[in-house]
Image (cartoon, grey):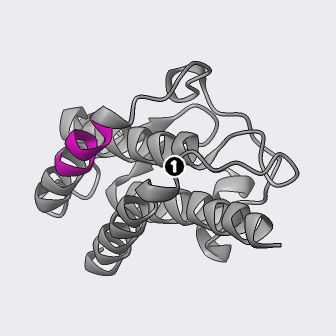
């Protein structure tokens, strides 16, 4: 679990470092510009880790999902396969003014995440309940998925 938290912290640092490039887009790589990927990644991580805080471990109900197992084992999310839930899919203008506050909130949530009960969980809309360690691994994988897209957007601009 500590490894996952360190991976998330590193990914948050990389998201923060991407802020100067926030307005850059590359439609052949992604329909969204870098600012959307930053905001979306932070929103998702906060939502998931907040859910761990709010969950009742006694209510944890495991659910087998081959897709969840594959993603957690491979450590990556295939591109173009999933659609973000509306709560995480800002279709309007991105407000970068809130990003530093979101980063600080996420860093604070990470401090307490390892103290949560093992069966604290996040209820994923497709995968069902993901216990603490699975949820933290998923946050790391999801954030890195978007960091790779950001890197590809920047690479497309360089060409």
Q: Which secondary structure class fits the magenta region best? A: helix
Residue 138 visible somewhere in the drawing: yes
Task: Choose top left, top right, bottom left or bottom right for residue 16.
Answer: bottom left
| Left or right: 31 as drawn, with respect to 122 | right
Region in magenta: 98-104
Query: Which part of the image, by quadrant, shows the N terminus?
Result: bottom left
The residue shown at (72%, 34%) is 83
In the picture shown, does residue 10 fall above or below 48?
below
Residue that protrudes farthest toward the bottom in the picture: 3
Residue 62 point in image, percent of width and height: 49, 46
The mark total stands at 1
- Which residue, as the protein is rendered here, is positioned at the far right? 28
Residue 33, image x, y percentages: 65, 44
* SS at circle 1: loop
Position of the C terminus, as image quadrant, is bottom right
The residue labelled by disc 1 is 22
- Residue 101 lies in the magenta stretch: yes
From what the image shows, is residue 129 above or below residue 93? below
From what the image shows, is residue 17 above or below residue 63? below
Residue 61 in sight in this render: no
Residue lying at 58% horizontally and 49% vertically, measured from the top left: 34
Q: Residue at x 53, y 22 (%)?
A: 93
């Amino acid at each position: 679990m500590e490894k996952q938290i360190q991976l998330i912290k590193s990914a948050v640092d990389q998201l923060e470092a991407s802020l100067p490039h926030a307005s850059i887009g590359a439609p052949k790589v992604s329909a969204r510009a870098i600012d959307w990927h930053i905001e979306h990644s932070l929103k998702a991580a906060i939502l998931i880790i907040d859910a761990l805080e709010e969950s009742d471990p006694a209510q944890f109900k495991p659910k087998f999902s081959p897709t969840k197992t594959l993603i957690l084992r491979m450590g990556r999310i295939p591109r173009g396969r999933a659609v973000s839930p509306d709560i995480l899919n800002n279709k309007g203008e991105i407000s970068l003014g809130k990003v530093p506050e979101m980063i600080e909130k996420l860093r604070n949530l990470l401090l307490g995440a390892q103290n949560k009960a093992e069966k604290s969980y996040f209820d994923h809309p497709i995968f069902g309940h993901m216990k603490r360690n699975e949820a933290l691994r998923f946050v790391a994988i999801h954030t890195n998925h978007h960091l790779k897209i950001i890197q590809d957007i920047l690479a497309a601009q360089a060409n």
